Image: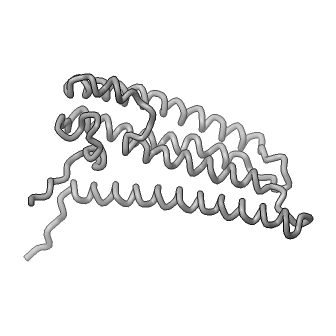
Amino acid sequence: MSARIPDPPRRLDRFFAAWDRIEQSLVGVLGLLALVVGVVQVLGRYIRPGQAISYAEEVIVYLLIWAIMISSSQLVRSDGHVRPDLVLRLMPARMQRWVELFNCTVALVITAGLIAYGWEIVDTALLLDERSSTDLQFPMALYYLALPVGSALMFVRYCIRFLRFAFRYDPATMSVGHAAGHETPLDMTIPAVD
């Protein structure tokens, strides 16, 4: 008896679930590190002012910008970005599909531009060996890298979203106001039977 190969949608679901966990964990770790650096900085100012970390605010900014850019991918997945839901709710489900496809197309163009522009900034920072002006002398290319990385994550999520609305559209679960349909990457999972 041969081993059964799992269905591609199940493997795809596991891949996207792992991707979500990695992003969410990374954002949590970055936020926690920013909090720890902030607490150490505040305590250092009051307990040993002469030995307080002079570049703590800079590190906190770097950590939080990376966390924000990574979490923007999760916002695409869960419809968390700012959008005119009120207007979409007034439209029939069929029209919502076309507006969402248009929205995805515009978002793909914008995120592609952010990726290209972000790489240009990173490349320039590497070329100039740009560093922060504090004692830390942090390589700014690592900081700037958050823009193309976060934009690339959003680009992939918008591609998935576009494909869902183009080829797997279900007005019952994908119309505005029904968030559950946005949780699966291509809506290829089989619904549970009661």
Q: Is residue 138 left or right of residue 8?
A: right
Residue 120 placed where, x, y %?
63, 34
Question: Residue 87 occupies which quadrant of the picture?
Answer: top left
Question: Residue 146 occupies which quadrant of the picture?
Answer: top right
Query: Measured along the vertical axis of the image, is residue 11 above or below residue 108?
Result: below
Picture quarter with the C terminus: bottom left
Residue 161 placed where, x, y %?
32, 38
Q: Is residue 34 left or right of residue 56?
A: left
Q: Is residue 130 left or right of residue 7?
A: right
Image point 75% across, 52% down: which residue? 57
Decide which of 13, 127 is in the foreground and name it: 13
Image point 38% across, 37% down: which residue? 158
Q: How is the image coloured?
A: one colour
Residue ranking furthest to the bottom: 1
Query: Measured along the vertical axis of the image, is residue 47 above or below residue 145?
Result: below
Count how many numbered circles sit on residues in the image. 0
Image point 65% across, 60% down: which residue? 35
Picture quarter with the N terminus: bottom left
Query: Measured along the vertical axis of the image, is residue 66 above or below residue 158?
Result: below
Residue 97 placed where, x, y %?
25, 28
Image point 46% across, 57% down: which residue? 24
Residue 51 placed where, x, y %?
88, 66
Decide which of 36, 104 is in the foreground and name it: 36
